[in-house]
């Protein structure tokens, strides 16, 4: 079952949005220019990277950034970030690999400027209270929460593909990931993919009613930083984005190397999970990996492009390399110790 909204987004409005999404907004630089080596004092960004904000606050660095953060909006769902980019309300965000594909399909011109790679599954399938789903194989014939513009949507497609379950053997229910829990609780869907700390919060409330978290082998490999092209055509913002890529990577390493401080600052105080759940979540985290070469990340993104387009979403396939601004390729990896530039075996 394909979602009407996304078909309309491709066929009905994409060309009109392409004109606005590709506007330079009077930028004073271009995508072939070398990255600035210093940040001008008037540089400003609106940034949606809540984990980095909490890390900077926990380490006392929030007030000492070399540019002004006008605000830290918590805009996490890919479609919401795309909409914020389109309206000029957001300069930089973190997401998975699928939102840039969605953005391109709906005419929003943006580029990936930072890449972190993971090798183990991040998501599990939460089930509705009282469901009889005990494994991925049991998803056949079920109603599954599905948002094609988000990482969770790709996890659904990869999971079904690996299990040999055709799209005609399930009912994909078009919802934003922010609606999944309400739909599960209300019995509108049978299962939906989710990650921590949402898994812990949901099970704490509904485990006694039969809700479960079902393992999947589907890996959502990329965590990215990305920005509208218009932002990267503004030399002051470009300089600030380049500096933030380094800050993003360094602070992620701080969180990995200070697990107790991170658990308390983020999972307990910011995300409101119990200290016990925070400790358990820590055991599921994967050591950060920032590749110095993006070839593997681009190959994974191409697989995702092919998967979603072959499944009937986001138009025709295209060269995934066009989503990446490789001027930024080495910034994150060079900002972290060498041990975080090498991928560990899962």
Image (spheres, rainbow, N blue to C red):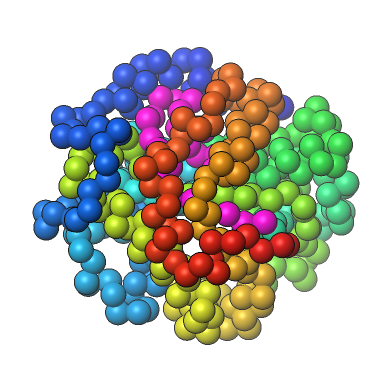
Where 231 sits versus 256, above or below?
above
Q: Which residue shows up at 28% across the image and 75% down it?
A: 61
The stretch of residues the image draws in magenta is 96-119
Residue 164 position, x and y percent, is 86, 36
The answer to which of 183 and 223 lies nearer the viewer is: 223
Residue 231 located left or right of residue 120: left
The answer to which of 103 and 65 lies nearer the viewer is: 65
Q: Which residue shows up at 37% across the image and 30% down it?
A: 109
Residue 4 position, x and y percent, is 59, 23
Residue 124 position, x and y percent, is 71, 56
Where 343 sits versus 2, above or below?
below
The answer to which of 207 and 177 lies nearer the viewer is: 177
Residue 13 located left or right of residue 341: left
Residue 181 position, x and y percent, is 62, 54
Residue 118 included in the magenta stretch of the image: yes
Q: Residue furthest left?
A: 42
Residue 93 included in the magenta stretch of the image: no
**Picture quarter with the N terminus:** top right
Residue 186 appears in the rendering: no
**Picture quarter with the C terminus:** bottom right
How many discs appear? 0
Q: Which residue shows up at 53% across the image and 74% down it?
A: 256
Where 237 sits versus 325, above or below?
below
Q: Which residue shows up at 80% across the image and 27% down it?
A: 168
The answer to which of 333 and 129 lies nearer the viewer is: 333
Where 76 sits versus 289, above or below?
above
């Amino acid at each position: 079952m394909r979602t009407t909204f996304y078909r309309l987004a491709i066929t009905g409005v994409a060309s009109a949005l392409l004109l606005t999404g590709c506007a330079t907004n009077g930028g004073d630089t271009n995508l072939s220019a070398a990255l600035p080596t210093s940040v001008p004092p008037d540089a400003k960004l609106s940034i949606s990277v809540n984990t980095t904000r909490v890390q900077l606050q926990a380490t006392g660095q929030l007030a000492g950034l070399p540019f002004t953060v006008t605000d830290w909006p918590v805009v996490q769902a890919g479609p919401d970030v795309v909409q914020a980019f389109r309206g000029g309300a957001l300069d930089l965000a973190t997401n998975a690999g699928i939102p840039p594909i969605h953005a391109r399909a709906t005419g929003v011109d943006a580029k990936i400027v930072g890449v972190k790679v993971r090798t183990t599954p991040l998501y599990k399938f939460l089930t509705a209270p009282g469901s009889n789903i005990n494994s991925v194989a049991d998803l056949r014939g079920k109603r599954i929460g599905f948002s094609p513009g988000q990482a969770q949507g790709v996890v659904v497609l990869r999971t079904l593909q690996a299990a040999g379950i055709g799209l005609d053997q399930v009912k994909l229910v078009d919802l934003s990931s922010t609606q999944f829990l309400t739909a599960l609780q209300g019995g509108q869907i049978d299962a939906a993919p989710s990650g921590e700390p949402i898994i812990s919060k949901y099970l704490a409330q509904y485990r006694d009613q039969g809700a479960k978290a079902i393992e999947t082998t589907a890996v959502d490999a990329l965590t990215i930083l990305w920005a509208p092209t218009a932002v990267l055509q503004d030399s002051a913002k470009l300089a600030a984005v380049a500096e933030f890529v380094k800050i993003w990577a360094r602070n992620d390493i701080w969180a990995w190397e200070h697990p107790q401080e991170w658990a308390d600052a983020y999972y307990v105080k910011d995300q409101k999970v119990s200290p016990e759940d925070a400790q358990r979540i820590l055991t599921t985290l994967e050591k950060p990996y920032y590749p110095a070469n993006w070839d593997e990340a681009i190959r994974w993104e191409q697989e995702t492009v092919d998967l979603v387009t072959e499944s009937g979403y986001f138009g025709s396939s295209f060269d995934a390399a066009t989503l990446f601004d490789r001027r930024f390729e080495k910034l994150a990896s060079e900002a972290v110790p060498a041990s975080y530039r090498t991928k560990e075996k899962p």
